[in-house]
Amino acid sequence: MTKKRVLTGINTTGTLHIGNYVGAIRPAIQDSRDPNVESFFFLADLHALIKCQDPARIERSRMQIAATWLAAGLDPERVTLYRQSDIPEIPLLCWMFDCVMSKGLLNRAHAYKAAVDAATAAGKDPDADVSMGLFSYPVLMAADILMFNAEEVPVGHDQLQHLEMARDAAQRFNNLYATPEHPFFVLPQATGGSSIEVLPGLDGRKMSKSYNNVIPLFEGGRAALDAAIARIVTDSRAPGEPKDPDSTSLTVIFDAFATPEERENFRAELRSGLGWGEAKKRLADQLDREIGPMRARYEELMAHPAQKFCRKAPARRVSLQRPSWPNCVMPWASEASPKSPHLRQLKRRRRKCSARPSSSTGKRTGASTSSSFPLRATNCSFPKALSPGGMPASGSAA
Ligand code: TRP
């Protein structure tokens, strides 16, 4: 039986909060333990460039996200873990989609519309704050997903539109360049769309860095957790007065870390007068029960990234084959003068690779992987995914 491919990526732009953990990290790691699932986890460092032009911050965020995945229980032996920028075919595919997707569709993308609305409200030119990267964000995301023919992408509500656009890209491309019997791309499904938990933030709005209402996952330790929880907005009812459990984010956040029985008890206590201060302490303890041990692992990984990551993750190779869509869209690009070093190199690679048995992943993409030389970035091992230009032998990259 072929395994189901599930793909998940995180933008490497900042530190993670418990909303990311509950909505994306925890379910994806759970999925990856399913023997019928083939998981892809990647650091979306090309997407990061859209919002952040501070390389040091992206670098640090990449470390943090990778360490978070490991600390939260991701087994790098079971999954394919890579850095988006290690796969040059992703931006290539993005460009190909750029050439077939309609601007009209992309005009409707939420992030683009929000930037236009904000600029207009500020009396500026509507596109004043829009880079081509921002505009093309959904296209790059489509390339991320379709590159590996992921069948399922667990995403929250805010990403559902991007999945629709990825399906659109797949369909257009298949119609243009493939036959119905041998499509290049499978149409990915968003999973969890409605069931994926979207945690409210301290002020009751969606937990989001842009609202400055987050509870950090690991950064700042238990003290930062307590400090954030202390800021959760509640009403002014005094200890002893009955409280409405649904009047605050406190219970919703509690629910995400509790058993049904614990949830019920907490609500009952609030109804019978538990003080907000005490309730916040219970919430912090409840969260820390799950994330405290992970935080210890996280801190250790961040303190000694090179050694730990190297030992933990012996190079796992992505056994994917080079896709044939580039040849199909631009057959001339593989034609080179017989004397060209490129061609010689290509032939050498072809010879090498035709000796290799085709992997199950290669089979899956069937018609789309007819040429058999492998992806340039075959070595997407975890250590490499952590530091640009390869892994330092030792020392701290944090
Ligand atoms: N857009 C996602 C986010 O904001 C990150 C991401 C980039 C992604 N490419 C993806 C997620 C492909 C899933 C699949 O977090």
Image: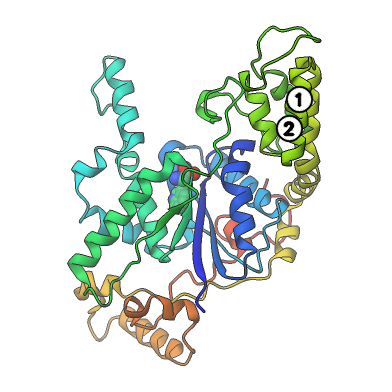
Q: Residues within 10 Å of mark 2 (few under 14, many from 20)?
A: few
- Say if 122 sits above or below 188 in the image: above
- Say if 361 sits above or below 119 in the image: below
Name the residue that disc number 2 marks: 264
Amino acid type at mark 2: Glu
Residue 172 position by quadrant = bottom left
Residue 370 position by quadrant = bottom left
Instruction: Name the image quarter holding the C terminus.
Output: top right
Q: Residues within 10 Å of mark 1 (few under 14, many from 20)?
A: some
The residue under the point 60% across, 51% down is 27
Q: Can residue 174 be seen in the rendering of this structure?
A: yes
Residue 171 at what x, y percent from top left? Answer: 25, 61
Q: Is residue 379 left or right of residue 312?
A: left
The residue under the point 27% across, 19% down is 120
- Say if 21 sits above or below 280 in the image: below
- Foreground residue, 107 or 195? 195
- Foreground residue, 122 or 394? 122
- Badge 1 element: helix
Q: Is residue 384 left or right of residue 165?
A: right
Marks 2,1: beta carbons within 8 A = yes
Residue 226 at what x, y percent from top left? Answer: 76, 25
Amino acid type at mark 1: Ala
- Foreground residue, 262 or 27? 262
The residue under the point 70% across, 51% down is 72
Q: Which numbered circle lies on residue 268?
A: 1
The residue under the point 47% across, 93% down is 355
Q: Can residue 17 be seen in the rendering of this structure?
A: no
